[in-house]
Image (spheres, rainbow, N blue to C red):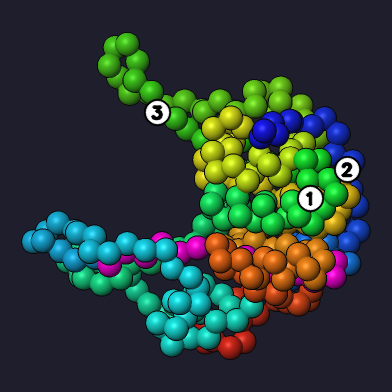
Amino acid sequence: MTTPLEGPLADSDAGLWITELLAPPGTVTGTVPGGFEAYARIFHPIHAQLMSWDQDYPEVVESRRLLWSELAQERGTVAHPLMQWDSVLAGYRNPVWNEPGWQYEDPLVGSLATGSLAEVARILAGHTSTPEECLAGLWEGWGWVSGAEVRHTVGTDGRSRTEPASPPFGQAGVFGAARLELPGRKYLLFNAGLSLFADPRWQEASGWDGLQSPNLLWPKDRQWFLATEIDFDSTLVGGSAALIDALVQSDVVECLAVPPDGDLTQLGDLLNERPD
């Protein structure tokens, strides 16, 4: 049975331990707390389409999911744990009007795709004694969370109107909840079990936006920690060596072990040239 998502919580003290264990931003342990035995980086998948044109109309010849390592091989760049998307692309430009060729969509930034999250949640569940007692953190700045996004409606007179979207958890739920404050970020916290995120349909009952995964996730026993930083196109996990090995060996997600002090900025990719 899928565990419901409970929150936002009125107390954020359960996450206070994180701040003391964070290194400078931009590094692996600047996103995931230090002190774990090993760390991994999960690369958000790429969607690629081979485009052709019938006069002025585009046609999709082929569509496929692509790994970063596969793209690196095609582009003649190096796949490695600290590779960066722009460097792997090596200056490639997607085709424009009436140009055939491969179109590569940028990986999701700040969110792990539902199918990938389901696989990761399944693996994480085997490496904690409290799989149904976890805390999920959601960055407060997403527009759909605060109601800052605008929705378009049509009135009875047929005229189009714009108005702020309602927060999914209600005004009191969003604005009255405590925030977990980490360097440069504030998060709403929710109680959740891993069985929820292992279900690809979990957003339907949760009230969360369909494209947004938890930005933070950890179990009560703190055996591991997952973070999808809002500016990163990959997800980081800290935990035991056995957990990291299980993630790396997965056939569903693309994952590599990373050093705790690994630089995840553009400057950290020392094996590929940075684009101009």
Q: Position of residue 224 (x, y in %)?
A: 80, 58
Query: Where residue 214 sits: x, y (%)?
Result: 66, 47
Mark number, residue 218: 1
Q: Which residues are magenta?
A: 36-50
| Rendering quarter of residue 252 | bottom right
Q: Amino acid at mark 1?
A: Trp
For badge 2, the amino acid type reads Ala
Whether residue 221 is situated above or below residue 265 in the rendered picture: above
* Above or below, comparing residue 127 to residue 275 in the picture: above
Label 2: how many Cα within 10 Å (few below 14, some 14–19, many 20+) = few
Give the secondary structure at mark 3. Answer: strand
Asked whether 45 or 132 is in front, the reply is 132
At which x and y percent is residue 67? Answer: 48, 70
Q: Tell me the mark number nearer the camera, choosing from 1 and 2.
A: 1
Mark in front: 2 vs 3: 2
Q: Is residue 39 magenta?
A: yes
What whole-number distance in Å separates the C-alpha atoms at marks 2 and 3?
38 Å
